[in-house]
Amino acid sequence: METRAYFVIGDLAVNILVGALVGGLMALMFGPAWNMFAAMIVGMALGMLVSVPLAFVASGLFGAMEVMLPVMTTGMLAGMAVPMVASMAAHTFGDGALMGGVCGLAVFVATYVANAFIKRKASEWTS
C-alpha cells in the first residue's frame, strides 16, 4: 500500500465516498418488507456492482491495487450491513450514507493495518 499523503488521503476519501453512496442507495432500496438474509445477499451484490465503476475511476488517480481491494470490500460490506439494518426499520438516505461511510472508514483502516502486519511478517519470512 502507498504511504504518501496524497494516496492515503485519496484512498480514504474514495472509501468513505463509495461507502456513503452504497449505504444511501441501499437504505432507499431496502425496507422492513425484506427478509434480513435476502436483503444482505442482494445488497452485497448490488454494493459491489455500484462500487466497480467508482473504483475504476479512482484507480487512475490513486493506484489500482490501493483502490480496488478496499473499495470493492467497502461496497460489499456497506451493501450487506445497511440492508440488514434497513430490513428491521425504515431508514433515510442520510442514515444509510452515514453507516456506509463508517463501513468505508473501517475497511480503509483494516486494509492498512493488515498491510502493515503482512509487510512486517513478510520481511521476517524472506530474510
Image: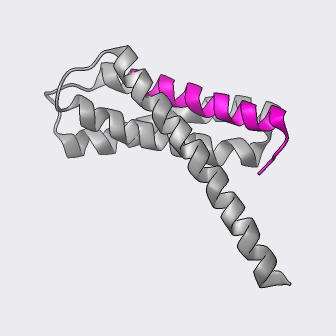
Question: Whole-percent x and y of residue 80?
Answer: 36, 41
Location of the C terminus by quadrant is bottom right
* Of 34 and 111, the residue lying toward us: 111
Answer whether residue 103 is magenta in the image.
Answer: no
Q: Which residue sits at x=23%, y=43%?
A: 38
* Of 5 and 47, the residue lying toward us: 5
* Of 93 and 110, the residue lying toward us: 110
Question: Whole-percent x and y of residue 29?
Answer: 31, 23
Horizontal side, residue 27 vs residue 126: left or right: left
Q: Which residue sits at x=52%, y=42%?
A: 106
Question: Whole-percent x and y of residue 52?
Answer: 59, 36
Question: Whole-percent x and y of residue 7?
Answer: 80, 36
Q: Which residues are magenta?
A: 1-24
Picture quadrant of residue 42: top left
User: Magenta segment, principal secondary structure?
Assistant: helix
Picture quadrant of residue 39: top left
Q: Which residue sits at x=69%, y=59%?
A: 115
Picture quadrant of residue 118: bottom right
